[in-house]
């Protein structure tokens, strides 16, 4: 690490601590030439995840979009905010595990639908009706028939 005072390239680490949230490390260093101390921070470099939309445009991943979609689907249903937050956490973990730089919006939608199907069938049908953009009542009825069959 280059000393900010004399630009010497050699130092020693005097103290090292993790930040309160554990997402960075604070290091106290001492320059081996001038003896002055300085602080550096080490943090994992995160590459922002991009979402590929239906029209092939790309935008930054936004947790709030998933959360808002699920909240709307679960409106007036016996589903707690904690359950919804937990579902969004699970979806994010699956996305982070399976995709490095880009994920298609369709894959996010399918994850949401699978989670909603297990949580609340009415919320699932609400979300599916918007997500799948049913063209007529028959398409909608097909989804309900599949639900009734189990």
Image (spheres, grey):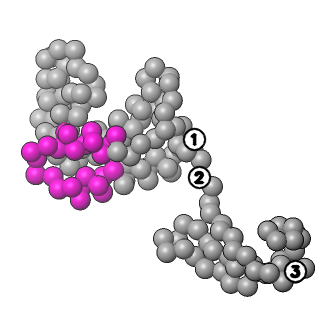
Q: Tell me which corner region of the image, top left, top right, bottom left or bottom right, holds residue 137.
A: top left
Q: Provide the secondary structure element on which disc 3 rests.
A: loop
Res 103 visible: no
On whether residue 81 falls in the magenta region, the answer is yes
Query: Residue 147 at x, y = what percent?
Result: 16, 35
Residue lying at 23% horizontally and 34% vertically, measured from the top left? 127
Residue ID for mark 2:
46
Residue lying at 13% horizontally and 39% vertically, measured from the top left? 122
N-terminal label among 2 and 1: 2
From the viewer's perspective, is 24 left or right of 54? right
Query: Residue 145 at x, y = what percent?
Result: 13, 28
Q: Is residue 94 above or below residue 106?
A: below
Residue lying at 27% horizontally and 42% vertically, measured from the top left? 68
Residue ID for mark 1:
101
Q: Main secondary structure of the magenta part?
A: helix
Q: Is residue 146 above or below residue 134?
A: below
Q: Is residue 64 above or below residue 144?
A: below
Query: Residue 56 at x, y = what percent?
Result: 50, 23
What is the magenta range? 65-88
Pointers 1 and 3 in contact (C-beta within 8 Å): no
C-alpha distance separating marks 1 and 3: 43 Å
C-alpha distance separating marks 2 and 3: 34 Å
Image mark for residue 136: none
**104 or 115: nearer the viewer:** 104
In this view, the mark in front (2 or 3): 3
In this view, the mark in front (1 or 3): 3
């Amino acid at each position: 690490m280059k000393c900010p005072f004399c630009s010497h390239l050699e130092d020693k680490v005097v103290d090292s601590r993790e930040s309160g949230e554990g997402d960075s490390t604070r290091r106290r260093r001492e320059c081996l030439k001038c003896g002055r101390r300085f602080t550096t921070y080490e943090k994992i470099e995160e590459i922002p995840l991009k979402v590929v939309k239906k029209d092939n445009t790309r935008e930054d991943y936004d947790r709030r979009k998933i959360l808002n979609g699920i909240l709307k689907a679960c409106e007036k249903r016996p589903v707690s905010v904690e359950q919804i937050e937990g579902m969004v956490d699970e979806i994010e973990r699956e996305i982070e595990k399976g995709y490095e730089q880009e994920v298609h919006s369709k894959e996010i939608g399918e994850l949401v639908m699978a989670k909603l199907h297990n949580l609340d069938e009415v919320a699932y049908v609400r979300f599916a009706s918007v997500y799948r953009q049913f063209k007529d009542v028959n398409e909608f009825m097909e989804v309900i028939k599949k639900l009734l069959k189990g």
